[in-house]
Image (cartoon, helix red, strand yellow):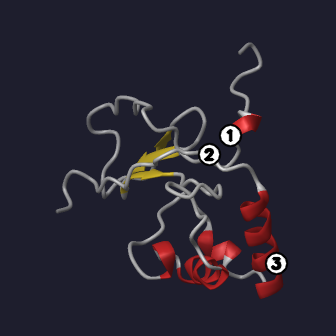
Amino acid sequence: MPAGPAPDTARLLYGYPSGSRLPEIPAGVLGQEKWGAITTNDMTAWLGPLGVSFSSNLTPDAKTGIRSWPEDMFIKTIRTGKFMGMSRDILPPMPWQSFGQMTDDDLKAIFVYLKSISPVNNQVPAPIPPPDVK
């Protein structure tokens, strides 16, 4: 597009597009002791010292989104920075620390909104740890 990337309004908040390829990372650019990150043009994947993180599918799709999530799980996820409120860490660029400061009423309103948008079947990959972390 001449004006640059534009959001696909038919698939808002569906996360990292499944089947997409990550850009090549130049050797020596990123590492545990270095600052910086590389992102895809649509900013749904971030590559940095913590590995690769992918934007989650926040649509109410039954298989790949948050349709089965109860409200309390959503709020716990945002408050703790843990996926589904109890498992792996939510990685950058998700600013859960800031969103976690919102009131319960605000988080409930966001949850209602997310449940109201069109579901999009889009399986987002799990985060990829950095190569030197086992």
The answer to whether residue 37 is seen in the rendering is no
In this view, the mark in front (1 or 2): 2
Check the image and report above or below for 33 versus 124. Answer: below
Sequence-wise first label, 1 or 3: 1
How packed mark 2 is, by other alpha carbons closer than 10 Å (few <14, some 14-19, many 20 or more), is: many
Q: Which residue type does callout 1 highlight?
A: Arg
Sequence-wise first label, 2 or 3: 3
Q: Are marks 1 and 2 in contact (CB under 8 Å)?
A: yes
Q: Which residue type does callout 3 highlight?
A: Asp
Which residue is at 71% across, 22% downward? 4
The answer to whether residue 125 is seen in the rendering is yes
Sequence-wise first label, 1 or 2: 1
Q: Quadrant of the N terminus?
A: top right
How packed mark 1 is, by other alpha carbons closer than 10 Å (few <14, some 14-19, many 20 or more), is: some
Q: How far apart, in angstroms, are the residues tagged by discs 1 and 2? A: 6 Å
Q: Which residue is mark 2?
A: 120
Q: Is residue 36 left or right of residue 2?
A: left
Q: Residue furthest top?
A: 2
Check the image and report above or below for 131 versus 24. Answer: below
